[in-house]
């Protein structure tokens, strides 16, 4: 009797290019590479360079294709044009069965469009986030709506994101609530740090310098905050850091529009450490030693609640209302006065602090990649 011919694995092309996409997709790369039903091909645009490479190294991922598109202070139109032509060429060469993109960056949007132009199904991880305001976050709100208009499978992190997609008339059987892969990433990195504590030990010097002080972890990079917003954020940090009981640890994003303001306004202050972007294990360590996180980041809004840390969000709106609804996140905008007031309340009012400092996981249980892999297998009809 002849053996049935083995079903050939489905070729999945994952496209990403910035730090947060790499963090949120490495667990899926690991899961797909471990599964014989799939052939996983990784294409990085390298929209970010150093900040992307930090993640690839920790996660042990060597991309199959690297477009190396990052240029200093790149404009959105030049970036998008380069991404579209570069990603299209890779798709012609790889000839994937499906393409996966994550979130709402220029790379994700161009990756989805290049796939659509080739009539390739494109699946969207972290689908359905909506702030309802096309200028906040800018340009991400429109990027993700464009991707949503083309996606085959929509992997929505929460019921809220699922509901947003259904309101946009996406067919219900195309939308799956999977959780967010960021929690898979956080679980993975936490386990790695437990196994090898040296992975997160480089903050020891700062921890010793600031021993006894209450640490505030800060990140900031949003384009809509450039200019006046960044100035206000710097003013707030100066004022808070004037308190003798506080220390601010601020890994500064490599975007020159962020670095210029922060270096000019905050360098040399005793209670402020402006440091280079941390790799993922060290950033997880920073969240764990911080009393409060102050950020305009998307990912940090998801990680801080999972680690039980209050997070003050320097934005006008958020597409991640789950943390706010649960009380661990609060929108504070970018007025220096409001930021200082909100931080002072958390520092000085124990009850206010305790009510925000509760670990909870509205964004997932760490099993999101496993769910996505099974949904992909169902879709392809290629189950083992
Ligand atoms: C990008 C994404 C944003 C995401 C953010 C995460 C778009 C339009 N923006 O914003 O959605 O939230 O990444 O951090 O897709 N740079 C370096 N080295 C790096 C990274 C950046 O030098 O490793 C500098 C370069 O000068 C680069 C600039 O930062 O030109 C801006 O990078 P870009 O990817 O265009 O925008 P971000 O503001 O990082
Ligand atoms: N992060 C990191 N090192 C840092 C700052 C942030 O590894 O110095 C991680 C953080 O844990 C989160 C992600 O980067 O997972 C967020 O990236 P960013 O704020 O750049 O983008 P966003 O999430 O706003 O798109």
Image (cartoon, grey):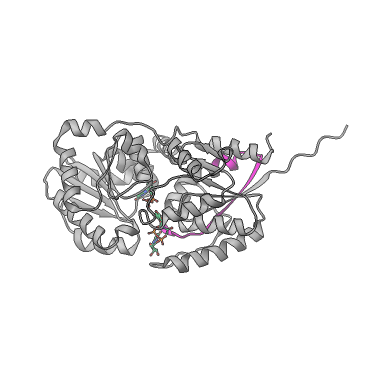
Judge from the rendering whether residue 324 lies leftward or rightward of residue 64; answer left or right: left
Foreground pick, 329 / 74 = 329
Among all residues in the image, which is located at the extreme right?
1
Give the x, y percent position of residue 84.
55, 63
* Residue at 66%, 49% in the rendered image: 97
* Residue at 43%, 38% in the rendered image: 160
Total labels: the figure holds: 0
* Residue at 37%, 53% in the rendered image: 137
Asked whether residue 34 is drawn in magenta, I would say: yes
Judge from the rendering whether residue 174 lies leftward or rightward of residue 10; answer left or right: left
Foreground pick, 253 / 275 = 253
Give the magenta range: 30-50
Picture quarter containing residue 71? bottom left
Q: Quadrant of the C terminus?
A: top right
Give the x, y percent position of residue 214.
19, 40
Give the x, y percent position of residue 271.
17, 50
277 up-or-down from 289: above or below? below
Picture quarter containing residue 299? top left
Q: Is residue 212 visible?
A: no
Foreground pick, 206 / 93 = 93
Q: Is residue 77 visible?
A: yes
* Residue at 39%, 68% in the rendered image: 72
Foreground pick, 376 / 51 = 376
Judge from the rendering whether residue 382 lies leftward or rightward of residue 269; answer left or right: right
Q: Quadrant of the N terminus?
A: top right
Asked whether residue 84 is drawn in magenta, I would say: no
Picture quarter containing residue 358? top left
Give the x, y percent position of residue 182.
43, 41
């Amino acid at each position: 009797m002849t053996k049935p011919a083995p079903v050939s694995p489905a070729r999945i092309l994952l496209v990403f290019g910035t730090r947060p996409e790499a963090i949120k997709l490495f667990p899926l790369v690991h899961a797909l590479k471990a599964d014989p039903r799939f052939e996983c091909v990784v294409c990085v645009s390298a929209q970010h360079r150093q900040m992307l490479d930090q993640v690839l190294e920790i996660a042990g991922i060597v991309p199959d294709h690297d477009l190396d598109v990052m240029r200093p202070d790149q404009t959105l139109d030049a970036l998008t044009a380069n991404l579209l032509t570069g990603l299209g060429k890779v798709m012609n060469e790889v000839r994937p069965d499906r393409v996966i993109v994550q979130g709402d960056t220029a790379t994700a949007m161009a990756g989805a469009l290049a796939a659509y132009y080739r009539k390739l199904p494109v699946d969207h991880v972290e689908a359905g986030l909506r702030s309802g305001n096309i200028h906040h976050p800018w340009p991400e709100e429109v990027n993700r709506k464009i991707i949503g208009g083309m996606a085959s499978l929509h992997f929505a992190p929460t019921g809220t994101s699922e509901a947003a997609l259904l309101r946009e008339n996406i067919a219900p059987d195309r939308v799956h609530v999977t959780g967010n892969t960021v929690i898979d990433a956080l679980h993975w990195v936490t386990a790695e740090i437990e196994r090898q504590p040296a992975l997160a030990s480089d903050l020891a010097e700062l921890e010793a310098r600031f021993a006894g002080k209450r640490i505030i972890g800060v990140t900031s990079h949003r384009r809509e905050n450039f200019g006046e917003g960044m100035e206000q954020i710097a003013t707030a940090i100066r004022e808070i850091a004037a308190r003798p009981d506080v220390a601010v640890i601020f890994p500064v994003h490599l975007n020159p529009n962020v670095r210029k303001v922060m270096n000019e306004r905050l360098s040399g202050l005793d209670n402020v450490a402006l440091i280079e972007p941390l790799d993922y294990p060290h950033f997880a360590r920073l969240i764990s030693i911080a009393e409060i996180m102050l950020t305009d980041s998307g990912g940090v809004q998801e990680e801080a609640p999972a680690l039980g840390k209050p997070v003050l969000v320097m934005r006008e709106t958020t597409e991640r209302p789950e943390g706010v609804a649960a009380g661990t996140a609060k929108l504070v905008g970018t007025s220096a006065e409001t930021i200082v007031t909100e931080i002072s309340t958390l520092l000085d009012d124990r009850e206010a602090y305790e009510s925000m400092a509760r670990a909870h996981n509205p964004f997932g249980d760490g099993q999101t990649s496993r769910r996505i892999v099974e949904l992909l297998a169902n879709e392809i009809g290629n189950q083992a």
